[in-house]
Amino acid sequence: MKFVTLTSILSLATSLVAGQSFCSGSSHSGQSVKVTSNKVGTIGSVGYELWADSGNNSATFYSDGSFSCTFQNAKDYLCRTGLSFDSTKTHDQLGHMYADFKLVKQNIQNVDYSYVGIYGWSRNPLVEYYIVDNWLSQWRPGDWVGNKKHGDFVIDGATYTVYENTRYGPSIDGDTQFKQFFSIRQQARDCGTIDITAHFQQWEKLGMKLGKMHEAKVLGEAGSTGSGTSGTADFPYAKVYIGSGNSNAGNSSAKTLPVSSSAKTLPVSSSAKTLPVTSSGKTLPVTSSGKTLPVTSSGKTLPLLPLVRPSQLLPLVRPSHHFLW
């Protein structure tokens, strides 16, 4: 028994050390492509996307999965890399999903809302989902992200607040009704491994069931309710994989799946997102810095989540990913 306990401790220690290696030292590598307008594409086995509704923006994507996002005077901007699927298998059928990421923030200005973490879609049911581990704004995303707050849960060793939302708008399947799922970490982190499947499993316990997977990607998104946001979100390490743990620890079972060509067919919605002003005519709450923020649905209305960008509704979609708003 003592031997088993010691072995477990040593195994955990080894895993933690390996898991931190990409946090202490990592840099972009492999082939690269620089994108200066909205685009969905692939480099090697990695799917990528840049989407913005305004401003002077760019992103550089690398074949190792890493990427760098630069935005200037953007109302809503996002870039992401990871795995694309063909919407024929559930996450259970695909296998246990993880993502490793490292974020370096540079000269971030005027960010009113932001999501850094994992983003994706599923079909049947149609769901847009977020696992948020960090943000580029001064404040953590709040109750305004969803009209149903499930509460706080310990997922993969950290506390996350889980939200659910029902929206109608642009999606990877056109203008239609869809669900949005959110896990938002209480304490932001700049680097680490996200157990994506652990979030899916917690959501299912709450009756929040995903359909057949369309994508799972590391996301950097920033938006402004004012004149526009600027800065750089650099991800010197980013990898989404299916396997048994840390991709940087020599996990031979980790594998990237082929990118679905359909991941890039969705046109960018030019109308994608008008941001916060409540329908009841109320003005959004003002932050200490004088910025207005989105209000919640209990009389306050959620910020029009960034309307989609093709395939992703970002909350409303953007090409292949549209966002929430």
Image (cartoon, rainbow, N blue to C red):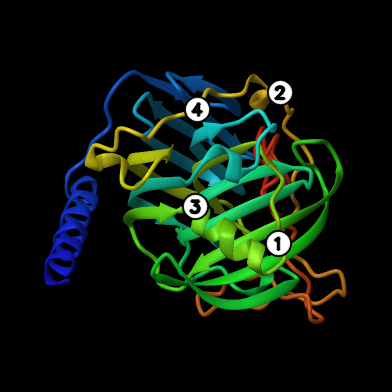
Circle 3 — which element?
A: helix
Residue beneath disc 4: 257
Camera-side residue of 274 and 181: 181
The amino acid at mark 3 is: Ile
Mark 3 or mark 1: name the one nearer the start of the chain. 3
| Disc 3 to disc 1: CB gap under 8 Å | no
Q: Marks 2 and 1: which is nearer the front? A: 1
Residue 309 place in picture, x, y as percent:
69, 39
Rendered view: 269 above or below 177 = above
Camera-side residue of 37 and 247: 247
Rendered view: 53 above or below 46 = below
| Disc 2 to disc 1: CB gap under 8 Å | no
The amino acid at mark 2 is: Thr
* Cα–Cα span, label 4 and label 2: 19 Å
Mark 2 or mark 3: name the one nearer the start of the chain. 3
Residue beneath disc 1: 208
Residue beneath disc 2: 265
Indicate left or right for 183 with 173 as reference. Answer: left
Camera-side residue of 245 and 179: 245
* Cα–Cα span, label 3 and label 1: 15 Å
The amino acid at mark 1 is: Met
Residue 9 place in picture, x, y as percent:
17, 65
The quadrant holding residue 266 is top right
Rendered view: 35 above or below 314 = above
